[in-house]
Image (tube, rainbow, N blue to C red):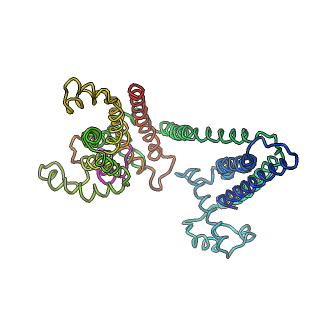
Amino acid sequence: MNVGIIILVVLAFAAAGYIAGKRQALSLSAQSGIKLHSLSGYYGQTVALFAAVPALLLLIVWLLVQPIVVESRVSGMIPDSAIAQGSARSLVMSDVRRIAGGLDAVLARGGLGEDELNTISANTQTVRARLAEVGVALAGEVQPVVFEAARAYRQTTKSGALAMTIAVLGVSLALAFLAYRRIEPQMRARNISEGFVKSLLIASSLIAILTTIGIVFSLVFETITFFKIYPASQFFFSTVWNPQFRGGSELGILPLLWGTMYVSFIALLVAVPIGLMIAIYLSEYAGRSMRSFAKPAIEMLAGIPTIVYGLFALVTIGPFLRDYFAQPLGLGSSSSSVLTAGLVMGVMIIPFVSSLSDDIINAVPQALRDGSYGLGATRSETIKKVVMPAALPGIVGAVLLAASRAIGETMIVVLGAGASAKLSLNPFEAMTTVTVKIVSQLTGDSEFSSPETLVAFALGLTLFTFTLALNVLALYIVRKYREQYE
């Protein structure tokens, strides 16, 4: 039984428990003449929660733990002698999973039975032909131990899935039955139900924190492995980015950081002035009808997929800058450039600056404006000397949030700025950023344990630390501002 069906069955048990619990509470109250402590719906809700929540939590934990246990068990079946020189255990386990998935597909299509599959080897023509039919092509001879590991992987996964189904459905039924049997008129069903819901809300609020912790730990562990292979001093201070994938690689982050900062700086040069002018107009000059139309229209820019911005940079902005500026000035001949990506990215983050700044300017108390007008200041003088200084901390926070959004952008840079890692001041040259190289280093069939692949985690941790610091600083400034003027 697959996971989707299990969830539907558990939800069906919960629905049935709700109806049964509600009816049982009303029936007991009628028989005993004792008034129910809570509304009848709370009794049914208690049974439904006991039927669904623990079972679904068990399902989630099982799905997280089972792959780790299966991988550990099957990996122990493969001796070091079965791992070819230049390969790694992780690559062999990848083959094991691929063959196991192929065997499942073969059995699903028919032509081979379970008993027949258990008596043949990987290199028989029947198995090779059946695996090829389902998209698993075995290029060379598969070692018997690898094929046996694949069969064990498949069988263990299958047994685990069956055990999971029995355990989850059993827990759901057992707890639903116990909750049903505990129903009595004086039972504080409302307190139990609300306590259950409160616990769920607390657990839900922890998801963001746990996700952040998981991201950090996943990056940190692989980064430590990378620095055991490649010196940290060369990574942070080298000015050359030249991954070879066959030894002799130079993996200096400085060219990537320079490209990231350069593109983001140009984007902010575009977004900050335009965004602030939009915010000032909407908050201080625009009428209600204009504001109700213009603000949603501008915010639509943030909803456009970044791949669309990237295509716009590649097809329109890049050739325009090359033909009318770069080539006539002798500064370059490529349509991919830092300026191309920066301009388009700046347009993309305009709503981040304008919308946040508009809200911040509107939060400035009207009393400050009235006092300025009472002293004889004009509207423009009031904006320059009263409103903007009062809103400045919040505007700085909005700019920092927009900067963190620009630093983490990938698709616009891929299509607009190119993939060349270099240190240059020429804005018409192609460069690249940290995010682009993370994608490129994890794309392809390179060995996962190689420094050329593990460097992506070091790049990710560096970028994560930088953007997290910007976000924390921005939120701190905005919060301090709001506490001052609300």
Locate residue 179 relative to residue 314 in the image: left or right: right
Q: Nearer the viewer, residue 325 or 270?
A: 270
Q: Residue at x 85, y 48 (%)?
A: 28
Residue furthest to the left in view is 328
* The stretch drawn in magenta includes residue 430: no
Q: Residue at x 72, y 72 (%)?
A: 113
Residue 136, position as x, y percentages in the image? 57, 67
Residue furthest to the bottom in view is 111
Q: Is residue 372 above or below residue 11?
A: above
Q: Residue 394: which quarter of the image?
A: top left
- Is residue 119 visible in the rendered image? The answer is yes
* The stretch drawn in magenta includes residue 410: yes
Q: Nearer the viewer, residue 447 or 220?
A: 220
Image quadrant where one finds the N terminus:
bottom right
Range drawn in magenta: 408-423
Q: Nearer the viewer, residue 212 or 203?
A: 203
Q: Nearer the viewer, residue 97 or 321?
A: 321
Q: Residue at x 63, y 52 (%)?
A: 81
Residue 365, position as x, y percentages in the image? 34, 29
Residue 462, position as x, y percentages in the image? 42, 37
Residue 309, position as x, y percentages in the image? 32, 54
